[in-house]
């Protein structure tokens, strides 16, 4: 049997040139439909055509695409087709497939006990995994902040247990992000948008309007602000239509200076949360800031 196995590469190489070219072309084009479907789904979400987006995402999710499962879970959990139960199940599958944003959202659900049994240990584990795997920016900032909030209500022993579970799971879900890619961070007492905590009102920094705002990005260079704003408007579409950009300069000492892109102010938390849900459904991230 071992000798026969050794002949297979030779037989492949002896395939007629035209057949070989056709096979290679088919292989190269195999991923194009999935990419096209995902682009169509993102465009449909941005246009709030949720039924069309679901139609594009479902086949990809059924084939095992973790990102498609995450996007579909977002839509179901936001009430756009499907059920909450289906949304939570897809979210779990996407989180186990290593999607950091799905891990972050699942951690929040465990922290609140929404759709899953309340468990700070599970919440801390999933938020820790999300913080490891998320790219620098708002996504990781939200995961780290929520993890810190959950950690504050746990005993040291509980945190150690949860961290051990996170370390064990990390090898199976995704490799840790390089330590050099350290994002902007916030104090542990700062509340995250998903896990609301009591917060004393504070005056906004100079140049930033008072009231409730949504932070949608943070960049380390002031020269990058306009380009990031235009990129987000193009990518997210409708949720940012008519929104005014406000930039908050944050000096974090040794971590450097960051420029926070925010929209608002909003009349109340309900209005801000509604816009945040639309932004997340379109594939973006948002952080509730202000009183």
Image (tube, grey):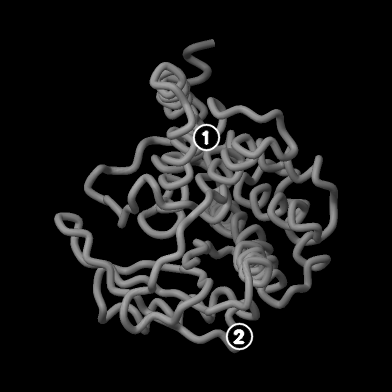
Q: Which mark is residue 289?
A: none
The residue indicated by pointer 1 is 126
Q: Is residue 39 visible?
A: no
Q: Residues within 10 Å of mark 1 (few under 14, many from 20)?
A: many
Splitting the image into 4 quarters, where does residue 168 fall?
A: top left
> In the picture provided, is 116 more to the left or to the right than 199?
right
Residue occupying image coordinates x 71% and y 49%? 73
Q: Position of residue 153 (x, y in %)?
A: 48, 31
Depth order, front residue of 211/144: 211
Depth order, front residue of 218/288: 288
**First along the sequence among labels 1 and 2:** 1
Q: CA distance from mark 1 to mark 2?
A: 33 Å
Which residue is most to the left? 254
> SS class of the residue under badge 1?
helix
Residue occupying image coordinates x 36% and y 37%? 176
Q: Position of residue 207 (x, y in %)?
A: 34, 84
Depth order, front residue of 223/254: 254
Number of numbered tags placed on the structure image: 2
> In the picture provided, is 221 more to the left or to the right than 210?
left
Q: Residues within 10 Å of mark 2 (few under 14, many from 20)?
A: few
Residue occupying image coordinates x 31% and y 57%? 184
Q: Which mark is residue 241?
A: 2
């Amino acid at each position: 049997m071992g000798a026969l196995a050794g002949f297979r590469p030779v037989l492949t190489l002896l395939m007629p040139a035209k057949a070989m070219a056709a096979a290679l072309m088919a292989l190269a084009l195999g991923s194009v439909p999935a990419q096209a479907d995902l682009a169509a789904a993102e465009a449909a979400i941005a246009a709030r055509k949720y039924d069309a987006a679901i139609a594009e995402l479902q086949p990809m999710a059924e084939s095992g695409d973790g990102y498609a499962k995450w996007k579909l879970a977002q839509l179901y959990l936001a009430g756009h087709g499907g059920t909450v139960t289906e949304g939570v199940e897809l979210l779990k599958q996407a989180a186990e497939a290593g999607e950091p944003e799905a891990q972050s959202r699942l951690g929040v659900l465990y922290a609140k006990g929404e759709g899953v049994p309340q468990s700070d240990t599970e919440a801390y584990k999933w938020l820790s995994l999300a913080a490891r795997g998320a790219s620098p920016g708002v996504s990781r900032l939200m995961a780290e902040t929520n993890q810190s909030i959950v950690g504050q209500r746990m005993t040291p022993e509980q945190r150690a247990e949860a961290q051990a579970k996170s370390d064990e799971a990390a090898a199976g879900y995704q490799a840790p992000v390089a330590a050099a890619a350290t994002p902007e961070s916030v104090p542990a007492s700062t509340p995250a948008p998903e896990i609301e905590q009591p917060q004393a009102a504070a005056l906004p920094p100079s140049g930033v309007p008072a009231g409730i705002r949504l932070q949608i990005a943070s960049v380390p260079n002031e020269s990058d602000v306009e380009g990031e704003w235009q990129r987000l408007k193009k990518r997210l579409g409708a949720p940012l239509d008519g929104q005014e950009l406000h930039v908050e300069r944050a000096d974090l000492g040794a971590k450097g200076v960051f420029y926070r892109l925010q929209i608002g102010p909003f009349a109340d938390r309900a209005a801000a949360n509604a816009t945040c849900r639309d932004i997340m459904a379109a594939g973006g991230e948002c952080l509730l800031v202000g009183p």
